[in-house]
Amino acid sequence: MKWPLVALLACFGFSALSSTPPASREKPSPDPKRPVYVIPIRDDIEPSIVFVIRRGIKEANDNNAQAIIIDMSTNGGRVDCMEEIVTLIESFKGETITYVNKKAYSAGAFIAVATKHIHMAPSSVIGAAAPIMLNPSSGEPQALPNTIQKKISSGIAARMRAAAQRNGHNPELVDAMVRETEGLKIDGKEIVKKGDILTLTDTEATARYGAPPKPLLAQGIANSFKELCDQYGYKEDQIRQIQSTGAEKAARWITLAAPVLLLIGMAGIYLEFKTPGVSLPGIIGVCALALFFFGHYIAGLSGFEEILLFAIGLILIGVEVFVLPGHVLPGFLGIVAILVAILWAMVDKVPAAPGISGVSLPLFLPKIQVPLLKLASSIIGAGIVIAILARYLPQGKGPAGKLMLHASLDKKDGYATAETHLELVGQKGVTLSMLRPSGTARVGNQVLDVITAGDFVGPNQPVIIREVRGAQIIVEKTSE
């Protein structure tokens, strides 16, 4: 498993600087008519936390909230999840506040810097944001080559400086949280020594420097969450608490298993077409696809639009198979609709802010790369499974063999076979009806029931008899 390294390398796509002017760090005037949303980050930062924050910010935007408060106590977590959270926070147009309730290490420090206001609880700490890679098997920190470590740290440091500049924080300060610097002094006081990674206590983070004096990083210390709300003038009846649900934790595993669910869904539906009336493969396939869309809907990635598009795709394929066989276009459009629905359900979307109409779109093209990889792997895996089933299922034994009829009617048991007219092989004729793939054709003075090898042939088309198997006459379209 290489996801930790992939997550760390994700930072290479970040822009180093931002042209957005720094935000004002003055406390905003409260609006008693607009709610304030509180979103907790109480565990390591991983996908289920992203789901909670996405839902919270979507609700805040939908209800025209005046502020969101990140109630934080975390040791850090995955870089890719951290970047998603930062993007979500940046999509909110109101005030953004972080309350460091106990600790904001590593990715937690980055998220805090992405908000306009930071406040500390007594004895809380923030910093130590240098990236590390965890060993997938043991979970222990794993050393990286010095060059790679410097490149990763440089990319994350640049992203943090951009966030700091945008939100009115000191970019040199947050840079010192990510990588070893030449040291940092402000007003002649050494903030961090050369070669050290910066971590600040509540007292250090709120200390004032410069002329006029400004807080080093955090705007103040709040003894409790209630005191923080009082400082901003937010009333208790305005507060909306967002809590993690069990479904969101389950959604994490469902989204991780998306390629497997898609593979099972495609293979199950194929088996249902291959062995109509058995039902079980079709039920399993539909349940796998339903679980796929359910997990992505709970995760905030999928909506009813993707499910509706998927259903339309199935209907178009049904039209191609049962109503208009051979027309190609309905089936093609159906396949495209299904693939787009599945792909779009896996793409991370930023919730729309108030005043922005239409469907939320991915902010960056790289966000579609992982969904494309998952979809491609599912299609390839399903293709392999279907090829194996198509080859071996008819001769299968055991549970798979029960899907096929193995009884035979032999001549020795008294059953008579149809007369075989081998003399017809090579003769030419004209179709009288549409071959789908069976129908009728005139060969000489005879009207015969014929069948193709699978192709559809229209009426009044020239055909030639290629093979005769008992009563089955197999024809092929010719150019004559």
Image (cartoon, rainbow, N blue to C red):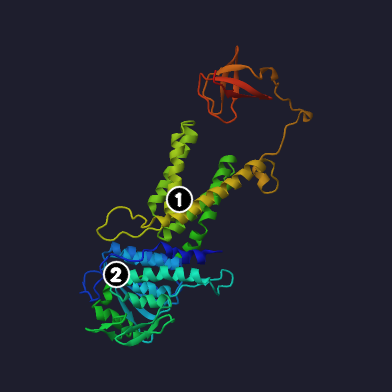
What amino acid type should be assigned to the residue bearing mark 1?
Ile
Residue occupying image coordinates x 43% and y 39% = 333
Residue position marked by numbered label 1 in the rendering = 342
What percent of the width, then of the height, locates residue 380?
A: 55, 48
What percent of the width, then of the height, locates residue 32?
A: 21, 72
User: In the figure, is residue 126 to the left or right of 209?
Assistant: right
Q: Secondary structure at mark 1?
A: helix
Residue position marked by numbered label 2 in the rendering = 166
* Residue 3 visible in the shown view: yes
Q: Quadrant of residue 105?
A: bottom left
Q: Secondary structure at mark 2?
A: helix
What percent of the width, then of the height, locates residue 408?
A: 72, 34
Q: Is residue 128 above or below residue 401?
A: below
What amino acid type should be assigned to the residue bearing mark 2?
Arg
Which label was assigned to residue 426? none
Q: Quadrant of residue 214?
A: bottom left
Dot 1: few (<14), some (14–19), or many (≥20) neighbours within 10 Å?
many
